Amino acid sequence: MLNFSWVVERLFDPRAIVDILVVTALFYWVLWVAQGTRALSVIRGIIFLFLILFITGEVLQLRTLNAILSAVWPALVIAIPVIFQPELRRAFEQLGHAGSWIRSPFPSQDDTAIESMIEEVVRASYQLSRLRYGALIVIERETTLQDFVARGVAINADISRQLLINIFFPNSPLHDAAVVIGSNRILAASVVLPLTDNISASSSLGTRHRAGVGITEESDAIAVIVSEETGQMSVAHSGRLIRNLDQDRLRRVLRTLLRIEATGTNTQQGGGPIGRIRRLFGADQIAQSSPRTRRETTPSP
């Protein structure tokens, strides 16, 4: 029988309260990291499967099944890092970049440079969209992309929309693959990026979009994608694809993801940058790399 006096005593124990808060925060962090990714579906599947097997074994007293389940639990310690390797890597990268969340309320020179970079990228993307020139522009953040940059053609030039448009001009030597921007400079062009491993997304996205999503699955970079077929502008971030963007929306998305705009009460409402984008443009603008990812549609004139 439950001892209520012991429960009340534990509730007023400061160490017990801290213990509960730490465990709650840990579970919340795990679910927050998995939210919107393929890992969430895998977690649900694992929990559902083991719950059904555990209840069945206990109710029907199936000794063999119970013995197998008892032996499987330790194996999960090894299986979980393997199954959730991309999500865990991204989570630990976010922890390592925790210092970047603390920002000064006053604009800095870095903010001014980033603002100028965003404006050049937005104007170039809009012009490329009008001309129906395909483009893939990757903006490096905390995670370095030097391994990919080394495989491309070094540029190391100031960011300008004229240069970006010339790079992606059809049949030019550097128009294929991606341009990487880092430290407010164009680092390299013709950079080959990894494609997303999501088979369902691969069936509905072109190579350029798959590469944009793929690099954001392996790093915290942001990819701006212009479709050659439709002229549609998209942004890939954390394995998600934000589609159907016009010039103003693209600017606002980049400002939000690069934390130029003050978040204010948006931070209290939760959801991080993606949550703020959902509130700005609606959930229908954000397509996950999942079976529900829609095919590109020709934008309205």
Image (cartoon, grey):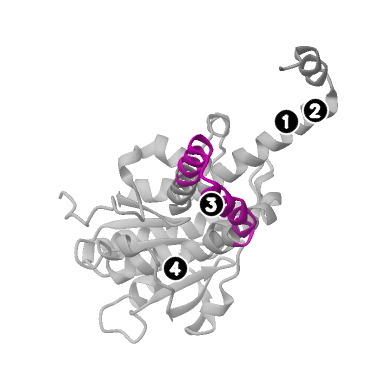
Q: Find residue 20 and name its label.
A: 1
Check if residue 68 falls in the magenta segment: yes
Question: Where does the image place residue 203, in percent across and percent down from the top left?
Answer: 26, 64
Q: Is residue 105 visible?
A: no
N-terminal label among 4 and 2: 2
User: Is 42 situated above or below 156?
Assistant: above
Q: Do the residues bearing badges 4 and 2 touch, measured as CB atoms within 8 Å?
A: no
Q: Quadrant of the N terminus?
A: top right
The residue tagged 2 is 16
The residue tagged 3 is 64
N-terminal label among 4 and 3: 3
Label the magenta part by its dominant secondary structure.
helix
Question: What's under tag 2, amino acid-wise?
Answer: Ala
How crowded pointer 4 is (Cα within 10 Å; few <14, some 14-19, many 20+) is rated as some
User: Is 27 situated above or below 71?
Assistant: above
Q: Find residue 160 and name its label.
A: 4
Check if residue 133 falls in the magenta segment: no
Left or right placement of residue 37 versus residue 291 in this view: right
Q: Which residues are magenta?
A: 49-78
